[in-house]
Amino acid sequence: KKILIINGPNLNLLGKREPAIYGSDSFDEFLSHLQEEFPQVAIDYFQSNVEGELINKIQEAGYDYDGIVLNAAAYTHTSIAIADAVKAITTPVIEVHISNTYSREIYRHQSFIAPVCQGIIIGFGLNSYKLAIQSFL
Ligand code: DQA
């Protein structure tokens, strides 16, 4: 199977960004562990801080991959355009979050993306990505 992980804005800073909330592991390190754990899965990774680049990637991958694991970060709570892109494609998408967004500020309680996803996995740290990949297998 072929799975794409897409991370949105500020997730390039994982490991040094608010470690009390997001942990102290960098995503690159985590990704190599993930690939070792799922040798039968081809895992690709894309990160951007730019909304349009995330949309371009969703469109590009959305008819080809077996699954997309999407952490749109703050765009989750603002982006109708990303939600529309997810709706447009045929590849199933799982929304993930590292932190439990429902235990945080009220503006993190709304997701434009959740209603158009196959499922959502929220609040399990980096393990959220692993659970999402398992759900595609
Ligand atoms: C996040 C939660 C979002 O509210 C926040 O803007 C992020 C990270 C998470 O994975 O916990 O950047 O998506």
Image (spheres, grey):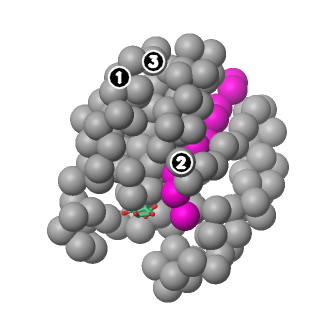
Residue drawn at the location 46% of the way across and 79% of the way down? 21
Give the labeled residue for mark 3: 89
Q: Is residue 33 left or right of residue 88?
A: right
Give the labeled residue for mark 1: 87
Give the labeled residue for mark 2: 50
Q: Secondary structure at mark 2?
A: loop
Circle 1 Cα neighbour tier, 10 Å, few/some/many (<14 / 14–19 / ≥20): some
Q: Position of residue 77 (x, y in %)?
A: 29, 53
- Closer to the eye: label 2 or 3: 2
Cα–Cα gap, marks 3 and 1: 6 Å
Q: Secondary structure at mark 1?
A: helix
Q: Earlier in the sequence, mark 2 or mark 1?
A: 2
- Tell me the kind of residue under disc 3: Ile
- Tell me the kind of residue under disc 2: Val
- Tell me the kind of residue under disc 1: Lys
Residue drawn at the location 60% of the way across and 49% of the way down? 48
- Closer to the eye: label 2 or 1: 2
Circle 2 Cα neighbour tier, 10 Å, few/some/many (<14 / 14–19 / ≥20): few
Cα–Cα gap, marks 2 and 1: 19 Å
Task: Report the predominant secondary structure element of the magenta stretch.
Answer: strand
